[in-house]
Amino acid sequence: MVAFRRLRPRHVGLIAIAIVLYYIHTTFKYHSNRFSKSESVWTESLPLESSTQIPNNLSFSAQVSIARETSRCTPKQHSRTLGAGALFVISLKRVESRRQQMDVLAKALDLDFTYINATDAQSSGVYGLQRVERIINRVRWQRDRLDEKDLEDGSVEADFHPRPSENHPDYVFDAFPFKWSNDAMDNFADPLANELGISGSDFWTLELDRFDSGEGLDEATAWEDANPMPAHWLHESWKQSSEALVNHASVRNNLQMSDHLSLGGVACADSHIRAIREIIRRKLDSAIIFEDDVDIEFSIERILQHEWPFLPPTWDIVYLGHCWSSTEPFQPFLDPKATYLRKTQHALCLHAHAVSLRGAHKLARFLRSPDYAYSRPIDHLIKDLVQMHYLESYTFVPALVVQTKEEESQIKVGQMNSAWKDVSGEWLVDSTKERIALVSGGFDEGG
């Protein structure tokens, strides 16, 4: 104690810094050892230069496969859908350049992509601006209405108008009455027991869906007549006013005052929901859903074949790509023999994820629960369901698919949206696009 009393403040500070540096060093060594289980986990990316002569008489996928000398093992048995029931790519029909790049990726990896035309807020038609505006109006309508039961049991007062809290001026907590739909909760334990049917926010766009399919409009018209919206919401002057803005929600019913639903964000959510519903419509055991601005780990098929057996039969969603996910590498591996798969803690972005048939039913029901539907960006909707333990989710770390961010975002027009890359450190060990460049000299060639 006497020795410590003689230390000056400067000396104490130096000792504290030394202790912190030692802690960082030992922690880094520990995690480095954890991540060295696989040859491709947290190692440096392979060099771009090719040291291999590529014969011209080989198929394009064969040329790409030998573009680099690597020790990667070939897949046990090739599947053009990576072992899933289908590979869906959500893509705006009008942005042909992205589909062309995805076609080159598919050819390089010998994959079979099925394109789903994304909902497009910049176009007309059933899956255009009219649909997106109708959804945003219904979100506002759902929050404004008070069920008679809420008023009768006294849980909500008729003049209920919550305000931001003093401690958190950016948030309004418990901003509107919230309840999960009976449809979501009654089918939670056994998602496949009952047909999906029509429920919740399905009615918001049912008129458009029925018109597109050629089915009768009676049910949709009757619902619209029984649940009218204010006529002035359709006026252009009102659409441009601040009153028309609809705030993002967080968790269940907390409102973020600085963030609002956007046309692009709602269109993106609707596109993903339609892709999920396609799994159900086609009764696929599973499907992998891609967005159209991605690059793929060249060894993805071999890695999936190694890791997939470790998944429990109750899995709902698996993130093959993710962002803002810096906590994921510190989650334990799913199995002692696994080298990528971990339980999901916090993953955003939906540029590549697998969904089981069971998971598709759960997602469809929760995402159409009226108080929750379209209430925030789709990746946040799903992330919150995972964190509330309504979905069983797993994550590949490092990611097998990354966003390229080479073109303007279709959700936030005018932005490249690449800041998350610096935070998450997402990159591929063996980029398929780099291999394509070695073979063809660029991505603009059809192969």
Image (cartoon, helix red, strand yellow):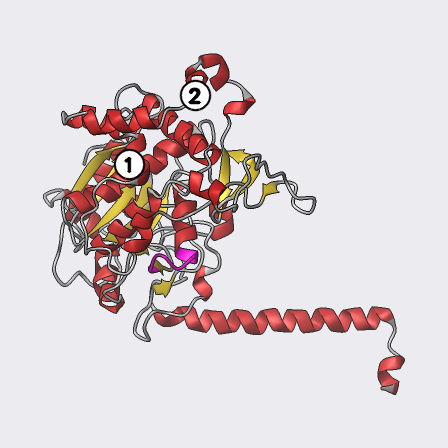
Q: Would residue 380 appear left or right of 112 to someone viewing this image?
A: right
The image quadrant that residue 163 belongs to is top right
Residue at image location 43% in from the left, 43% down from the top: 149
Q: Can residue 207 be seen in this view?
A: no
Look at mark 1 in the image and give the residue it sits on.
Answer: 202
Identify the residue at horizontal 49%, vertical 31% (top origin): 246
* Number of other residues with Cα within 10 Å of mark 1, as a class: few under 14, some 14 to 19, many 20 or more: some
Query: Which quadrant of the structure image shows residue 333?
Result: bottom left
Which circle, 1 or 2, is nearer the viewer? 2
Classify 272 as above or below 120: below
Residue 427 at least partly seen: yes
- Magenta segment boundaries in residue numbering: 386-393
Please, which residue is most extreme toward the bottom here? Answer: 2
Which residue is the site of mark 2?
Answer: 230
Magenta stretch holds residue 389: yes
Of residues 256 and 98, the one drawn nearer to the viewer in this rendering: 256
Q: Which amino acid does label 2 sit on?
A: Pro
Query: Quick check: marks 1 and 2 in contact, CB under 8 Å?
Result: no
| Camera-nearest residue between 306 and 444 | 306
Q: In this view, does 194 lie to the left or right of 385?
A: left
Question: In what quadrant of the picture does the N terminus appear?
Answer: bottom right
Q: Is residue 249 left or right of residue 67?
A: right
| Residue 418: percent from left, percent from top | 47, 40
Q: Distance between the residues labelled 1 and 2?
A: 20 Å
**What x and y, as percent, mark residue 245?**
51, 27
Q: Is residue 112 magenta?
A: no
Which of the image's four quarters has the C terminus? Answer: top left
Does residue 171 lie above or below 414 as drawn? below
Q: How many labels does the image show?
A: 2
**In this picture, is 367 found above or below 236?**
below
Q: Which of marks 1 and 2 is nearer the N terminus?
A: 1
